[in-house]
Image: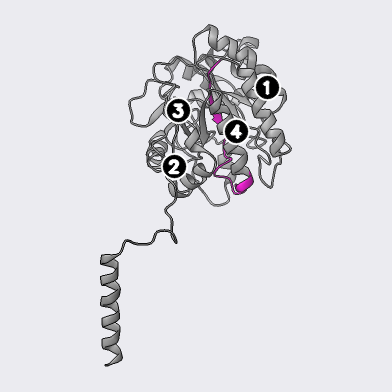
């Protein structure tokens, strides 16, 4: 019998066998399905806590600065970046309870927080776990939104150790009744497919959702489209968008002009924070990065903290801000 005919007969025999015998899945087991925590939608009908202790509000009280109202009179997230910051949590929690308002915190203390350039954050995974436990203790019976570790998931130094540290933090906070939103980065950083894989490694299945555009200037529209696509890949988790500084969108991406990302000349406040959202999948628009905070020592700035010059620029260029405030801010010296 010719070799070619033997090959055909063999192929038919294999096909017949495939039709009469169940496939053996023991050699290639299917991955277990991901089980997601039930969504609780903490922002629905919630009033965000207005903290009178923000840097902008403190600066306004110390100076005749009515022009700062568009920033100082709106809710902003409170950042926790060190062990010392945890001392502020019980008072914030009590204020939120007394005012029946939703507290939004940012946990920003993961080990090797800045990857290879700046090694801030907890000294080790064990220290980070203790820090997370102390955060849980400081919140007590108060249920808060915790935006967990901006940039940690999309960062170049994301690895198994970081994923494990984040997963443990998500589980610990969520297990204590807190609403965790694990940071996912922004639309111009990583693809939704890669980001979804990293979020799953980091414990998104135990969280309420993820945050988009934290401390960045991507437009709300681009952030929403990217967030929706990402949500579809991680069990339809809810997401929030940081609109604190995206009123004019990202600065131009020009060769040799990295300084445009650091205190850019053209920037504006994005949409005010709100929990009254109707777009599918979107939990809230938040001011996570405090507006007016400097990006660093660039473009004439000499601080990493609140800068009246940055706040003035954000207000003066924001279309939704009442003209009287815009004029006041624009008339101030640079």
- In percent of width and height, residue 90 lies at 64, 14
Q: Which residues are magenta?
A: 142-161
Circle 3 or circle 1, nearest the eye: 1
Mark earlier in primary sequence (4, 2): 2
Up/down of 103 relative to 313, above or below: above
Count residues near mark 2 (Cα–Cα under 10 Å), then give few for <14, some for 14-19, many for 20+: few
Q: Which residue is mark 3?
A: 270
Element type at mark 3? loop
Count residues near mark 4 (Cα–Cα under 10 Å), then give few for <14, some for 14-19, many for 20+: many
Element type at mark 1? helix
**Residue 169 badge:** 4
- Image-quadrant location for residue 142: top right
Element type at mark 2? loop
Q: Which residue is mark 1?
A: 86
Dots 4, 3 in contact, CB < 8 A: no
Question: Is residue 144 rendered magenta in the image?
Answer: yes
- In percent of width and height, residue 98 lies at 54, 6
Circle 2 or circle 1, nearest the eye: 2
Q: Which residue is mark 2?
A: 34
Circle 1 or circle 4, nearest the eye: 4
Dots 2, 3 in contact, CB < 8 A: no
Question: Is residue 85 rendered magenta in the image?
Answer: no
């Amino acid at each position: 019998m010719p070799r070619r005919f033997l090959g055909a007969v063999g192929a038919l025999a294999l096909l017949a066998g495939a039709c009469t015998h169940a496939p053996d899945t023991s050699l290639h087991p299917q991955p277990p399905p991901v089980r997601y925590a039930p969504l609780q939608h903490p922002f629905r009908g919630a009033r965000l806590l207005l903290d009178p202790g923000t840097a902008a509000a403190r600066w306004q009280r110390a100076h005749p600065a009515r022009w700062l109202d568009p920033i100082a009179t709106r809710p902003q997230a409170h950042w926790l970046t060190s062990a010392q910051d945890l001392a502020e949590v019980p008072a914030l929690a009590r204020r939120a309870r007394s005012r029946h308002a939703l507290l939004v915190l940012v946990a920003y203390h993961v080990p090797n927080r800045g990857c290879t350039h700046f090694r801030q954050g907890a000294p080790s995974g064990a220290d980070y776990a203790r820090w997370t436990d102390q955060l849980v203790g400081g919140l007590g019976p108060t249920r808060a939104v915790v935006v967990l570790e901006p940039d940690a998931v999309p960062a170049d130094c994301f690895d198994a150790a970081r994923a494990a540290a984040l997963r443990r933090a998500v589980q610990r906070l969520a297990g204590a009744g807190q609403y965790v939103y694990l940071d996912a980065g922004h639309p111009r950083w990583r693809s939704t497919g890669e980001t979804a894989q990293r979020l799953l490694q980091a414990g998104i299945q135990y969280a309420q959702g993820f945050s988009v555009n934290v401390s960045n200037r991507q437009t709300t529209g681009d952030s929403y489209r990217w967030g929706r696509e990402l949500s579809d890949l991680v069990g339809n988790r809810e997401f929030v968008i940081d609109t604190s500084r995206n009123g004019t969108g990202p600065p131009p991406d020009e060769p040799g002009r990295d300084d445009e990302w650091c205190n850019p000349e053209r920037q504006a406040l994005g949409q005010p924070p709100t929990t009254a959202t109707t777009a599918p999948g979107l939990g809230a628009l938040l001011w996570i990065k405090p507006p007016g905070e400097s990006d660093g020592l660039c473009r004439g700035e000499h601080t990493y903290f609140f800068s009246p010059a940055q706040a003035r620029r954000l207000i003066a260029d924001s279309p939704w801000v009442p003209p009287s405030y815009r004029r006041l801010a624009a008339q101030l010296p640079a």
